[in-house]
Amino acid sequence: MKMITSTTQHKNKEKRKKKRIILATWNLQGTNEVGAIGNLVREAARYKIEVIALQETNQRGTNITEYKDYMLFNSGGDSNRLGTGFLIKKELKHAVVQFKPISDRMSYLRVRGRHRK
């Protein structure tokens, strides 16, 4: 038999605490200018945004890049036009199940979560 103390109950309550994730969308209109990604990361941190869906990244190819406290998942084409992606806090990277680039106009990010009523 396990004895449950008030500190144990408190710890369990903390673990069950609901975590709300702040989501946003942003049409970047390009990230090829010097400092564009840095500005994006600063603004995300400033507004405490944890996940941003990005449009018009204007980056080539598909890649995942780390910046300070964030990770950039990018889906671009063969040219520096169009492109989509996601910027997420590094502390959420354990929850990312899959990043799938579909085209330079669409991609998706599957994130593990818990559904509660």
Image (cartoon, helix red, strand yellow):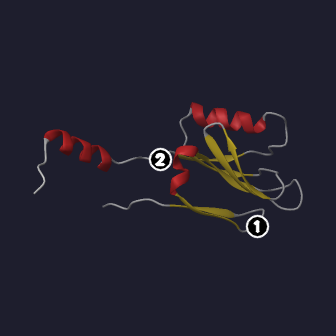
Query: Seen in the image, is 99 located left or right of residue 93?
Result: right
Location of residue 103 in the rendering, given as x and y in whole percent from the top left corner: 76, 67
Label annotation for residue 103 = 1
Which amino acid does the dot numbered 1 rest on?
A: Ser
Judge left or right: residue 53 versus residue 38. left
Q: Where the N terminus falls, by quadrant?
A: bottom left
Q: State which tag comes first along the sequence, 1 or 2.
A: 2
Image quadrant in which you'd find residue 28 = top right
Mark 1 burial class by Cα count in 10 Å: few <14, some 14-19, many 20+: some
Q: Which amino acid, mark 2?
A: Ile
For the residues marked 1 and 2, what is the alpha-carbon distance in whole angstroms? 26 Å
**Most foreground residue, 84 or 90:** 90
12 sits left or right of 32 in the view: left
Question: In this view, which residue lies farthest toward the right?
Answer: 79
- Horizontal side of residue 84 vs 51, given as left or right: right
Q: Residue at x 88, y 62 (%)?
A: 78
Q: Give the percent coordinates (x, y) of residue 63.
A: 75, 56
Q: Position of residue 48 (x, y in %)?
A: 53, 36
Residue shown at the point (80%, 43%) measured from the top left: 31
Q: What residue lies at 77% left-to-right and 52% top-to-bottom?
A: 56
Question: Secondary structure under badge 1?
Answer: loop
Q: Which residue is mark 2?
A: 21
Q: Dot 2: few (<14), some (14–19), or many (≥20) neighbours within 10 Å?
A: few
Quadrant of residue 8 in the image?
Answer: top left
Q: Which SS class for mark 2?
A: loop
Please say if 48 is above or below 91.
above
Considering the image in quadrants, where does the C terminus appear? bottom left
